[in-house]
Image (tube, rainbow, N blue to C red):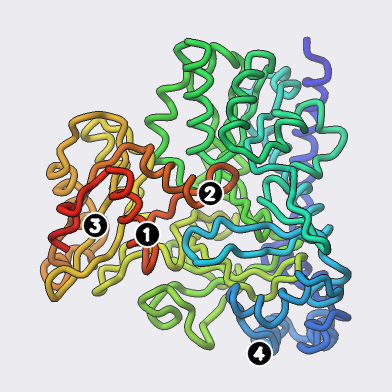
Amino acid sequence: MALVGSLLKRGIRISNIVANRRKATIHQQQKKTLAKLLAKARYTEFGEKYNFDELLSTILFGEKGSFYEQYKKSVPVYDYNAIFKEWWHRSLDGEKDICWPGRIKYYALSSGTSEAATKHIPVTKAMSKAIQKTSIRQILSLGHYKELPDDLYEKGFLMLGGSTNLNNQDSHYEGDLSGITASQIPAWFRPYYKPGEKIASEKDWGLKLEEITLKAHEWDIGFIVGVPAWIQLLMEKIISHYKVKTIHDIWPNLQVFAHGGVSFEPYRKGFEKLLARPLIYINTYLASEGFIAYQNRPNAQGMELVLDNGLFYEFVPFNQDNFDSEGTLLPSPETLMVDQVEEGKEYALLLSTCSGAWRYLIGDTLKFVDKSKAEIVITGRTKHYLSLCGEHLSVDNMNKAIDLISDELGLTVKEFTVCGVEHDSLFAHHWYIGVEEENVDPEILRNKVDAKLAELNDDYAVERKHALKDVFVTVLPNSAFYGWMESKGKMGGQHKFPRVLKNFLIQDWKDYLKSKGYVSDEVFAEE
């Protein structure tokens, strides 16, 4: 009997029972979290400018609910460009006590696929501890999965992320968040952590995958963690190298996949072809700004927000009153606390964090599927949706359409993206869909995509009769998508291909496809 695994599993179950008994209401948890953040940052320059002392007094001694109204009135809403220009650039230059006490040693570099410049997101010691604490909670939540054997808890955890060899910028270090967190893994977890410190430090993504592949047969992996696209590429590489049928021929005890970053559904069909038996899938919401939510029980509809660990949430109704047609936040938006939202409505997320983000627009959109449990699903990005003429097409709509079409046609679609283009004097959508199979008819795909979106989105159906005059589909191999990512230095880690391309990225994508011979000028002639 696996004694260590049995004791660990028993401890996990006891921890879950205790945690459930102690849990306060979602409002109380968030109120306490904001109080802790304000108390910690009240002597920073940001805290002094926006009277955090007074806000803290309102929380402690004011009438119920008045603290949030005061917080909204006192502190402005920021997007990345605004907070970086006014505050974060000073921390990046080595100044201390700007938005959070002390000097900030680490900065996470965002994927930068939807913006011209890479973003620098501060990662404080407090944030690193908060991420570790939530990661442990996620492991503890495995106690709810009764079918897991005791000895699974003694198996290896493969965490496929960015390089732990961070860039030294004199006053700070910077790199992928997954690289920052992996470089700070606690000592007790290191015996279970794979690929180990040496391989994890490798910056060349291709070489890292090669080194993991060569070592794979030596490891007994029970858990894998990472972005679906890169995990799938790795498993394909391992299966090919060892000339086996499935990944379970190499890792027979693999049972759990914790994934995040994008919807898993477009990858599921191709992913499961690589398995001998089903895995337990656990959805996570770990962004550069913090560990926001995770699926904490079997068959949960969504992920539960982490309400009591360094993150205060606000929700902006994602509608034309608060955002323009490009997904840019308008001045003075309506904002709500977690207990004020409604299930089924779409919101953009604001964060105040223990890394010195304050009322910060993270860029993701979400819906509540169970308000009482604070469970959410991610629906897309504020700027990754199409509404050229009122069609209001979300990434959630796109993922569902592709998933339904893949099932109907028996296709394996890993990647896709959509561009809004001018067509004659009106508009059209141009889809680029990556498939594994050969000889796929683009016209069949085009008709299926158009029909499914009309079923899923009433606004889309209306505009297809008016200003949205056509839909184009270009079928590509998945290598085209990964090649473009590589050309941008965005392979691996937390990077993912944007589901919607806008502005200068549309032409950049077209130029890449033509330069590599994937398409000719004729493909774009009708636009």
The residue sitting at 73% across, 24% down in the picture is 153
Residue position for label 1: 508
Give amino acid for label 2: Lys
Q: CA distance from mark 2 to mark 3?
A: 23 Å
- Occupied quadrant, residue 40: bottom right
| Label 2 SS | loop
| SS type, badge 3 | strand
Whether residue 300 appears in this view of the structure is: yes
> Can you identify the residue that label 2 sits on?
490
| Disc ID at residue 430 | 3
Tell me the element at label 4. Answer: helix
Between label 2 and label 3, give the one nearer the viewer.
2
Instruction: Tell which circle, 4 or 1, labels the residue nearer the N-terminal end.
Output: 4
For the residue marked with disc 1, what is the amino acid? Asp
- Pick the residue in front: 153 or 48: 48
Q: Which residue is mark 4?
A: 73
Q: Where is residue 51 drawn, in percent x and y?
A: 80, 88
Cα–Cα span, label 4 and label 2: 39 Å
Tag count: 4
Considering only vertical position in the picture, is 140 above or below 74?
above
Question: Considering depth in this image, is 96 or 377 the residue closer to the camera?
Answer: 96
> What residue is drawn where x is 76% and y is 31%?
198
On the image, the x and y values in percent for residue 171 come to: 83, 64
